[in-house]
């Protein structure tokens, strides 16, 4: 009991120094905690950056897949247009039913040539736009596409898809128009 009593007296006499020592130890622990938190923030930021980079690559891949689908769809429409529409148009011309320079009734003073060239011209312009997007997405430059650039390409792709759908409707209408004259 004597030793505890002596220890207690010793602690009482040196309490100021002990408080300073405990404060210093707490300060060191606080600094280590701040450094550890900073390290965790750096790791979290790196993970976020990696996640954004992966998301950008995934968006680029999906965009590229969609562009290739558009390219394939354009080729299918061009084949269909050549096969169906132009074949029927040749047949109508051979039978002297349609002359390309005559006006088409109900088409605002457009000739048959203009009506039948319009969908094909739309397909050609969309085809060149698709080719430019593919080149931009697959270019081997060190510059990565930013998220804004990918969004702009996506907007352009949506415009192209809408135009392809309108072209498909135009091709269908032209097919119906020729069918009316061939009957």
Image (cartoon, rainbow, N blue to C red):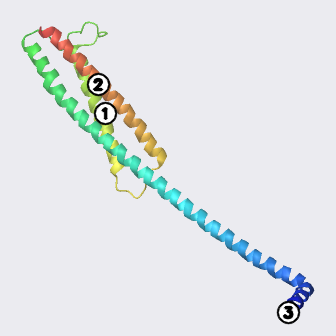
**Other-residue count near label 3 (Cα within 10 Å), few / some / many at <14 / 14–19 / ≥20:** few
In the picture of the structure, the residue carrying the numbered disc 2 is 167
Q: Is residue 70 above or below residue 85?
A: below
In the picture of the structure, the residue carrying the numbered disc 3 is 3
Q: CA distance from mark 1 to mark 2?
A: 10 Å
In this orientation, does residue 99 appear? Answer: no
Q: Which mark is in front, 1 or 3?
A: 3
The location of residue 144, given as percent across then percent down, is 43, 54
Which mark, by number, is residue 151? none
Q: Are marks 1 and 3 in contact (CB under 8 Å)?
A: no
Q: Which mark is in front, 3 or 2?
A: 3
Q: Residue at position x 68%, y 68% from top? A: 34
Q: Are marks 1 and 2 in contact (CB under 8 Å)?
A: yes
Front in this rendered view, residue 130 or 99: 130
Q: CA distance from mark 3 to mark 2?
A: 100 Å
Which mark, by number, is residue 126? 1
């Amino acid at each position: 009991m004597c030793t505890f009593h002596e220890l207690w007296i010793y602690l009482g006499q040196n309490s100021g120094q002990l408080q300073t020592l405990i404060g210093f130890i707490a300060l060191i622990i606080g600094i280590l905690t701040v450094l550890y938190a900073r390290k965790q923030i750096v790791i979290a930021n790196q993970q976020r950056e990696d996640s954004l980079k992966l998301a950008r690559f995934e968006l680029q891949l999906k965009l590229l897949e969609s562009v290739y689908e558009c390219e394939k769809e354009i080729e299918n429409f061009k084949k269909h247009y050549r096969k169906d529409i132009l074949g029927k148009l040749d047949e109508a011309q051979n039978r002297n039913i349609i002359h390309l320079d005559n006006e088409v009734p109900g088409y605002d003073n457009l000739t048959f040539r203009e009506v039948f060239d319009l969908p094909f011209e739309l397909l050609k312009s969309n085809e060149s736009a698709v080719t430019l997007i593919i080149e931009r997405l697959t270019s081997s430059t060190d510059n990565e596409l930013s998220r804004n650039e990918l969004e702009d390409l996506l907007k352009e792709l949506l415009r192209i898809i809408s135009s392809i759908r309108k072209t498909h409707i135009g091709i269908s209408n032209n097919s119906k128009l020729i069918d009316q004259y061939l009957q």
